[in-house]
Amino acid sequence: MANAAQAVVIQKNKLSEIFQDYGVELAFLFGSSTEQEISLIHDIDIAVLFSSYDFERYLETLFALNKAIKQKNVDLVVLNLANPALKMEALLKGILLYCTSSDAFARFSAATFFDYDDYSFFKKEFRSCLQKRSREGFSVAERKLNRERVETYLSKMDESIQRLVELRKRLTSYEDFMDDKDTRELCVHHLRISLECVLDICRHFLAVKGVTLSDLGTINLIELAGERGLLHGQFARRIKGMAGMRNAIVHVYWRLDYEAIYRAVTGELEDFDEFARQVNSYL
């Protein structure tokens, strides 16, 4: 362990009190702090996951850490807001300073691996589009969506939504939904396809139009698409939870929130209708 890391880890108990006081669930020492002598580094990088993030809490935590470590160069990274690549770096290369429980660490680890997998998938298309724009020249490159590709996604969404409309006719209550396993699993399947189509369209849009990779995470694809003009901003913010539901269905299928899925199938399918309308309007 490098001296810089030792200088921080040696105060682990004191830092743990700070993390506990300010609602931190996980904390990692990462970056150059784990590899170099303390005299050679510019910043001591500490990444934290707050149970509930707000900027005032961030500032108070940063002040307390600077005071405890007796350094004014602590760089506090908020994992709640970080992109998947940075989360993965902290998880794989960092030194764990604090953890509220093994469950908290397991949840963060699973979510990070899943998000990074999606992020890597997006980067392949993003790099292809970026290289194309680089060859053509950024100022003159055409940033046009592949209409056929988008319409393919919309047609798959249409097919799955129609199936969900048929399936929900079988349901009169949440109890019916839970008792009828075949119908329930079909609902999950077609809802997943519909959600995937939403995210695939947003990914394609952002790859073509351009986005800063540091801003990107699976959970904010929809909101970013709204900020860039594919969707109305207010609508994008309202449906951004679709990304989280898709991630849960794909990656955490063994503990799904069936109540949320039931609400989506029986009362929120119109959001997919509006999404399709806004995408077609953009095209």
Image (cartoon, rainbow, N blue to C red):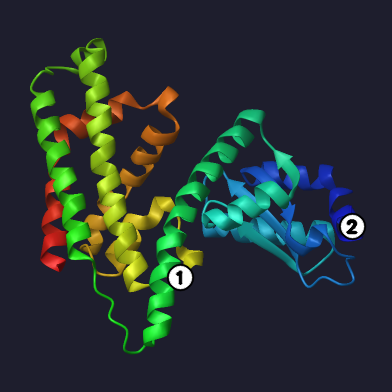
Q: Which label belongs to residue 18? A: none
Q: Which label belongs to residue 212? A: 1
Q: Nearer the viewer, residue 152 or 116?
A: 152
Residue at the spot 26% in from the left edge and 39% down from the top edge: 193
Tag 1 near tag 2, CB within 8 Å? no
Is residue 250 among what the camera can see?
yes
Which kind of residue does numbered mark 2 sit on? Answer: Ala
Residue at the spot 89% in from the left edge and 57% down from the top edge: 2
Q: Residue furthest top?
A: 179
The image quadrant where one finds the C terminus is bottom left
| Relative to 27, 271 lies left or right | left
Circle 1: element type? loop
Mark 2 Cα-neighbour bin, 10 Å: few <14, some 14–19, many ≥20: few
Which kind of residue does numbered mark 1 sit on? Answer: Thr
Residue under label 2, please give it. 2
Q: Is residue 231 above or below residue 20?
A: below
The answer to which of marks 1 and 2 sits earlier in the sequence is 2
Is residue 237 among what the camera can see?
no
Q: Position of residue 257 (x, y in %)?
A: 36, 27
The Cα–Cα distance between marks 1 and 2, rounded to whole angstroms, is: 32 Å
| Relative to 89, 8 lies left or right | right
Residue at the spot 36% in from the left edge and 85% down from the top edge: 136
Q: Nearer the viewer, residue 89 or 49?
A: 89
Q: Is residue 187 above or below residue 280?
A: above
